[in-house]
Image (cartoon, rainbow, N blue to C red):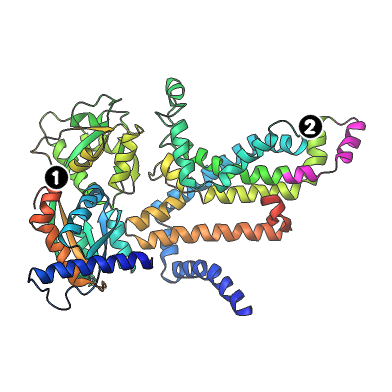
Amino acid sequence: MSRRRLAAVAALAVALGVGACSGGAASPGSSVGPVDLTIYAAASLKSVLASVQAAYGTARPAVTLTIATDSSAALETKIEQGAPADILLSADTANPQQLVDRGLAAGAPVAFATNRLTIIVPAANPASLRSPADLARPGIKIIAAASAVPITKYAEQLIRNLATVPGAPPDFATAYAANVVSREADVAAVVAKIALGEGDAGIVYVTDARSSTSVTSIDVPQASNVVATYAGVVVKASPRVTAARDFLDWLAGPGGRAVLAGFGFQAP
Amino acid sequence: MFGVAIIAALFLGLPVVALVARSIVDGSLSRALTARIVLDALWLSLLSTAVSLAIVVAFGMPLAILLARRRFRGSGLVEAIVDLPIVLPPSVAGLALLLVLGRRGLLGGPLGAAGIELPFTTLAVVLAQVFVSAPFFIRSARASIAEVDHELEDAARDLGASELQVFRGITVPLAAGGLAAGLVMSWARALGEFGATILFAGSIEGRTETLPLVVYGEFQGGNLDGSIAAAAILVLAAIGVLVAVRALHWGRALDVRTLG
């Protein structure tokens, strides 16, 4: 512990030294010591954040990021209950807005990425799904997310959109709902159960489909697809509001966007 | 020392008291008792634990008798296997069940050929409960049956009683305390089962979403009221279990020798 701290201080000293040499003296007080930011992030951000961690370590050597992922709604609840998060990165804009509305946010939410939906099936595709219309076929086992998880709202919109496509099966939405065999706590759990082959299909983000080699995706027509906007917000109770805001701005800026794009996220 | 003892008692007692008190004071318990999701889960919990308890007794009793009465090659191994689910994290149990009984699991092929798909069904809920709760009954039953005086059973046999008569007339009454304790503890464990259920059976209202899953699901969904109410019902059930054990003088049920 103390050795790690010593190493961190040494790293910071080097970083500051480099800064001083290059003549860009940091404004006093803005970065006086090593900062550890705790980020609560939507489950669908899990893979990309590992790369964000590395990239941010290069951009801001004095700042380390500790990341906890879960469903956005669960994270919002935990923050309301006083969980020690500095930042919430949500898969929607509603959960950050709820923190703002309850007076628990410092500043306005920042939209930093968008995502789209796709349908995933196990790589072997045991139920032989070919098109989105097959989701309504009787006997298909669909793994969905719980009602409060942001993707559920988007998925329901997608289903409504698909139901209006000419040639869609009658009662498409009802038949889809009847096929749902489980409602998982977050998107990552949906991907896991499809990857295991226990479910036949699930609606997830395009970026999730890329993250697993055990699933393949069935494309959703662009006209029916739904855009999910990801927003982040700084938690008011954080003792590190300045550093947190700095991270959020970086994530929404060119540095963060480059990493996000590598994982299939788009700019808002 | 007294002060430390008080801290220990408060640490164990206060969270539970606070939870139940809050559920009553803020009215979430009374509201929840009319909420469909909680009622569905309560019914499912009662139904699934009743079935799992019946399975535990039907299959656990013969094993308990065998372990109590005979030492055989590998009996130590069988005892260890029976004890394993007690010390195994429930999430591990759920994953293991999925890898054996899941669609692509070890037995998934033959089961599928027979038209049986277990994951995401109420039967999967029951199987998860049986897996984690059976050891509590088997251990307790084995210990209490082992303590029954053989001479009494032999005397009954000498008087012409059949094996079934000996079992029902001598063994069960003499082992009743341990058997009842095993039943109660096994039921309580099944009622509280969460990790294995959510992995193996998933979560859907009315079919696989038991009370512990409502506690988690409603919390995840930001409905703290529903979560607290479902939790309070489980606390009351747990207290009921302890009261039952005490009131019926099954004090030795909580003896380490029978529950390990």
* Percent position of residue A83, x then y: 33, 66
Give the crowd class for mark 2: few <14, some 14-19, many >=20 residues within 10 Å: few
Residue sitting at x 16%, y 36%: A163
Residue A108 visible? The answer is: no
Residue sitting at x 32%, y 68%: A6
Magenta-highlighted residues? B143-161
Q: Mark 2 against mark 1, which lies toward the viewer? A: 1
**Which numbered dot is residue B67?**
none
Q: Nearer the viewer, residue A84 or A140?
A: A84
Residue hosting label 2: B164
Quadrant hosting residue B9: bottom right
Tell me if A198 is positioned left or right of B56 in this view.
left
Seen in the picture, residue A112 relative to A164 is either above or below; the reply is below
Disc 1 residue type? Gly
Residue B147 lies within the magenta run: yes
Give the Cα distance between marks 2 and 1. Answer: 71 Å
Residue sitting at x 12%, y 69%: A19
Task: Name the image quarter holding the N terminus of chain B.
Answer: bottom right
Q: Are circles 2 and 1 on residues that touch, CB within 8 Å? A: no
Residue hosting label 1: A262
Seen in the picture, residue B214 relative to A198 is either above or below; the reply is below
Disc 2 residue type? Leu
Give the crowd class for mark 1: few <14, some 14-19, many >=20 residues within 10 Å: few
